[in-house]
Image (cartoon, rainbow, N blue to C red):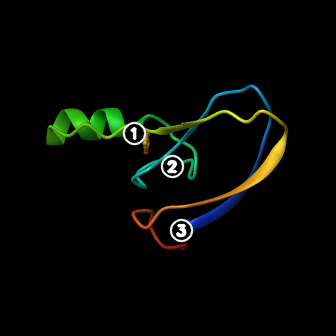
Amino acid sequence: MKKTSIIKLKKNIKHSICNFGFSKKMPYCDNAHRDYNKINNTNYKSVKVCLLNDDKIEISCSDWPDEK
Ligand code: FES
């Protein structure tokens, strides 16, 4: 996985982005945070993004795992 990703997003659709790196569909959230939160008593949540126009965005997070 990459710490930085460039992704294409469609307008008016809410996209969930993983903010802590446990998703198997990085950079998108696959709800793995829910199980992690239950086991570890934490409260991680995804970042929601909704664009006003179709566009590409560059996103990054220092908590994401390095590319393998
Ligand atoms: S799996 Fe990472 S925020 Fe949901």
* Within-10-Å neighbours for mark 3: few <14, some 14–19, many 20+: some
Residue 51 relative to residue 48: left or right: right
Q: Nearer the viewer, mark 3 or mark 2?
A: 3
* Within-10-Å neighbours for mark 1: few <14, some 14–19, many 20+: some
Q: Is mark 2 within 8 Å of ligand 1?
A: no
**23 and 11: which is toward the camera:** 11
Contact check, label 1 and label 2, Cβ < 8 Å: yes
Reading the image, the residue beneath label 3 is 3
Contact check, label 3 and label 2, Cβ < 8 Å: no
Reading the image, the residue beneath label 1 is 32
Q: Is mark 1 within 8 Å of ligand 1?
A: yes
**What secondary structure is found at the residue carrying circle 1?**
helix
Q: The disc labelled 3 sits on which kind of residue? A: Lys
Reading the image, the residue beneath label 2 is 24
Task: Determine the residue positioned at 35% across, 39% down.
Answer: 33
Please count the marks in the image.
Answer: 3
Q: The disc labelled 2 sits on which kind of residue? A: Lys
Q: Is residue 62 above or below residue 52?
A: below
Sequence-first tag of 1 and 3: 3
Q: The disc labelled 1 sits on which kind of residue? A: Ala
User: Residue 16 in the image: x percent, y percent?
Assistant: 56, 36
**What secondary structure is found at the residue carrying circle 2?**
loop
As measured in the structure, the alpha-carbon distance from the residue carrying label 3 to the one carrying label 2 is 14 Å
As measured in the structure, the alpha-carbon distance from the residue carrying label 1 to the one carrying label 3 is 18 Å
Rendered-image quadrant of the C terminus: bottom right
Residue 48 relative to residue 31: left or right: right
Q: Is residue 7 above or below residue 63?
A: above
Sequence-first tag of 3 and 2: 3
Task: Determine the residue positioned at 79% across, 52% down.
Answer: 56
